Image (tube, rainbow, N blue to C red):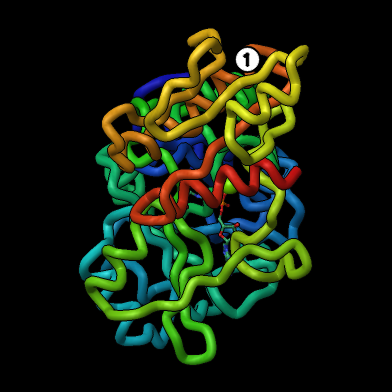
Amino acid sequence: MIGTDIDKAAWYLREGQVVAIPTETVYGLAGNALSQEAVSTIFSVKQRPSFDPLIIHVGRVSDIPFYAQGIPEVLRQLAESFMPGPLTLLLNKRLIIPDLVTAGSPRVAVRVPQHPVALSLLQQLDFPVAAPSANPFGYISPTTAQHVDQQLGDLIPYILDGGPCHIGVESTIVGMEAGYPTIFRKGGLSLEDIEARIGPVRVREHSTSNPAAPGMLKSHYAPGAPVVLGKPETIIAQNPHKRIGVIRFQQETPGLPEKYQLILSRSGNYREAARRLFAGMRALDAQRLDLIVAELLPEEDLGRAINDRLRRAAAS
Ligand code: TXA
Ligand code: MG
């Protein structure tokens, strides 16, 4: 059931049940992070392997020290500048956080979403909320309550509707590695914004070989049709009898029906592109295409996170 009743969502969460909640990045599948049972339900509803840990969400930056300790100075600076917002920090966890949440890791991922509905909900709870994106494992993340309803509606008692997500890609995950601040997942906070605040950071590229590495499972965000990266005109010419969809930053692809084209931002605005990406991929997916061709964006600003998602969609 979809609704806008924050108290109702809070009630389900206090009961140990799992509900979908809006954030500015994507919708989350939320449960009490301190309840083994609620966390187990999240894993089973999402069909997520238990080695892939969950982000905990809190309503105030000042709540973070209840769940994490020894916060490094550079990460504290990031928290100060970008929380609430599309930033997740990897911090040393306190014992109160169940190992199930962190998949046995001594570190916990923490985020303060910048969405009025999410904040109002989180601020009335006396526990943190574990929430992965509210999609079946491996599929495109949801950016509307309707997306969640289509896939998980029958499995959860409530979907809290906070409208379409403003950022549209998941949070950027930052932690320390070998003494350096390191981006473990590119996301809605750009590398440029982070470096402007704390100086150079490292970027960990994804790997399939080490699923213990954060957020790094390679094949992900995959629509039903196979996705390839490349120049649309070339691939269309090579496959004359296939029904082909195209994902592009700004440009139209002549001769292709409009409904087969996802043009992310005609004006070349990265924020608009990120906001439209996942909903656009779902709309293409509904066209029953044989193939989707995605052309990568310039590797800058939120283009990095968008390219990361396109590469992972193509990796399956
Ligand atoms: O924007 C977001 O971050 C959204 C919204 C709902 O907050 N959440 C989200 O969660 O994208 P999820 O579960 O789909 O992706 C979280 C990623 C996972 O790939 C996981 O591997 C990584 O964060 N992660 C979580 N806890 C971790 C930990 N303790 N150590 C390393 N990686 C962790
Ligand atoms: Mg996810």
Q: Is residue 288 above or below residue 246?
A: above
Q: Nearer the viewer, residue 305 or 81?
A: 305
Q: Position of residue 230 (x, y in %)?
A: 61, 39
Q: Position of residue 164 (x, y in %)?
A: 36, 27
Q: Is residue 59 left or right of residue 284?
A: left
Q: Is residue 72 above or below residue 183?
A: below
Q: Residue at x 49, y 15 (%)?
A: 254
Q: Residue at x 59, y 29 (%)?
A: 232
Which quarter of the rendering shows the C terminus?
top right
Q: Position of residue 93 (x, y in %)?
A: 51, 77
Q: Nearer the viewer, residue 245 or 32?
A: 245
Task: Check disc 1: other Cα within 10 Å, few if <14, some if 14-19, many if 20+.
Answer: some
Q: Position of residue 1 (x, y in %)?
A: 52, 18
Q: Is residue 73 above or below residue 136?
A: below
Residue 117 quadrant? top left
Residue with the mark numbered 1: 286
* Residue 291 visible: yes
* Residue 7 visible: no
Q: Which amino acid is tagged 1?
A: Ala
